[in-house]
Amino acid sequence: MTSSVNNTLDLETAEPKALAQALAKQLSIGPMDWHRLNSNRQIRAKEQIAAALVYLLNDNPEEALPRLEQAVGWLNRSIKAPPCPTHGERK
């Protein structure tokens, strides 16, 4: 069975960096979904962990660490979503 989509990665032969970048792209919150998902802790943690993996695979642990810390903050509820800059502060 062949795929009709040319942009798919072969999971068996793809480089880890390409896989991580594809994962990060899939897990990132797009502009159309931002207001609906920006406070979803699991989605935000997944997004941050995927980004951290990309940085780590690119030999940039200094950038990976803050993203991992943010992911932990989302999961342990020590951080929350800031107010939307286009709607002003929530009271």
Image (spheres, rainbow, N blue to C red):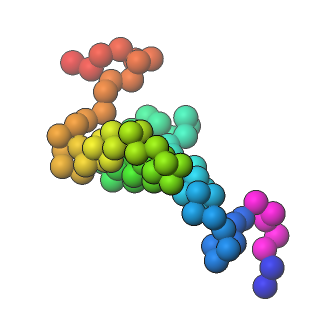
Quarter holding residue 78 = top left
Where residue 40 sits: x, y (%)?
34, 46
What predominant SS class does the magenta segment belong to?
loop
Q: Where 15 sits versus 41, above or below? A: below
Q: Kindly identify the residue that appears in the image at 30 percent across and 16 percent down.
A: 89
Q: Is residue 14 left or right of residue 47?
A: right
Q: From this viewpoint, is residue 40 visible?
A: no
Q: Kindly identify the residue that appears in the image at 54 percent across and 57 percent down.
A: 20
Q: Is residue 4 magenta?
A: yes
Where residue 11 sits: x, y (%)?
63, 73
Camera-side residue: 37 or 79? 79
Q: Is residue 38 magenta?
A: no
Q: From this viewpoint, is residue 55 visible?
A: yes
Instruction: Check the picture and name the quadrant holding the N terminus.
Output: bottom right
Instruction: Check the picture and name the quadrant holding the C terminus.
Output: top left
Where residue 26 sits: x, y (%)?
56, 54
What is the total number of numbered labels drawn onto the structure image? Answer: 0
The magenta-colored residue range is 3-7
Where residue 46 sits: x, y (%)?
40, 53
Camera-side residue: 71 or 33? 71
Q: Is residue 18 left or right of residue 35?
A: right
Q: Kindly identify the residue that appears in the image at 35 percent across and 14 percent down.
A: 88
Camera-side residue: 77 or 49? 49
